[in-house]
Image (tube, grey):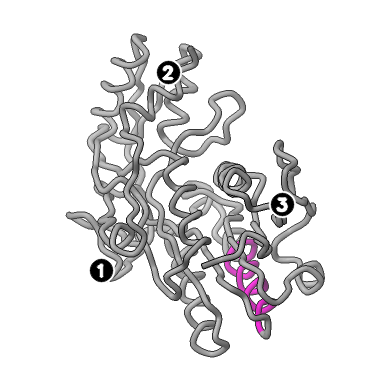
Amino acid sequence: MLNTKNRIIITGGAGFIGSHLTAALRKNGYKNLLVIDKNRPTDHGARFIKGDFSNSRLLHQIIKNGDIIVHLACSTIPSTSEQNKEKDIMENVIGAVRLLENCRGKKLKNFIFLSSGGTVYGNISQPAKETDAAKPSNAHGLMKYLIEKYIEIHHRLYGLNYTIVRASNPYGREVVGARKQGVIDIFFKKVLADEPIEIWGDGRVIRDYFHIDDLAALLLKIIKKPALNQTINAGSGQGISLNQLLKLINKITGKKLKVKYLPERNFDLSYNVLNISRAEKLYGWRPKISLKNGLKKLVKP
């Protein structure tokens, strides 16, 4: 079990997931936290270094024996991965390889990578298990899967301890000023501003959504007592269509929704839900916040 004095390095720690994880760690007594990000976090409870996670000179100076690295930084989302594949590879894949190379020879407690359960499995017809073949059908999924493979290579050749977390669709961003990512958070921002919601396709695509607090809770368990060298799904284990989601938002907010349906995009999947039984078996983890209660948390009193 990890001592709370062990240092935890979080790349992309100023972002949505990173800021929630940092807050959860501090709440649970972890004080030796280091955030590497291009942007300064709003929460100053961790030591902050402004920089790029792929900066080899910076990484060489920072990474020490006994560290835990939580690699969250990612410069793209699925749509921007498609728009600029070269940028996606250069910044994320090559950046991750540089990070991994700087871990060689360092006796890390764990290297935790946040992958994408929403894109690495590709087209599926039932909740995906970690043992199912990964068949990315878009650039973002391929990028995440390539990083997973490089992590596994560093484990086999250099003894790197790792945990890969394939997360579905976490939500719970602050509505004001939120990054344009995450269907639920974008929908709420539009609804509360009385702006039209744009949906690619007919709204029947099915996704797996879970609250950011539940993802932070799982990452905390992995940091505290890791089941090393595992790939773990993180999601709700349940699917809901965009049209059903809109009805639920309408019921919770009481607002009439303005919905604009656009032509479907060829890189969007029709169905994506994750089987989370491995996370429950290894960590006793299941999401505690239902979708309905999670959506209510987004509505300001």
Which amino acid type is marked by label 2?
Pro
Q: Is residue 92 magenta?
A: yes
Q: Classify mark 2: helix, strand or loop.
A: loop
Q: What are the residue bounds of the magenta stretch?
A: 90-104
Left or right of 122, for residue 113:
right
Q: Secondary structure at mark 1?
A: loop
Q: Earlier in the sequence, mark 3 or mark 2?
A: 3
According to the picture, the residue beneath numbered tag 2 turns out to be 196
Q: Magenta span: helix, strand or loop, mainly?
A: helix
x then y, percent, for residue 245 = 29, 28
Instruction: Identify the mark at residue 87; answer none if there is no mark.
Output: none
- Amino acid carrying mark 1 in the image: Asp
Give the amino acid at mark 3: Asp
- Gap between marks 2 and 1 measured at Cα: 38 Å
Q: Which is in the foreground here, disc 2 or disc 1?
A: 1
Classify 10 Å Cα crowding around label 1: few (below 14), some (14-19), many (20 and above).
few
Q: Which mark is residue 132?
A: 1
Whether 151 is drawn above or below 177: the answer is below
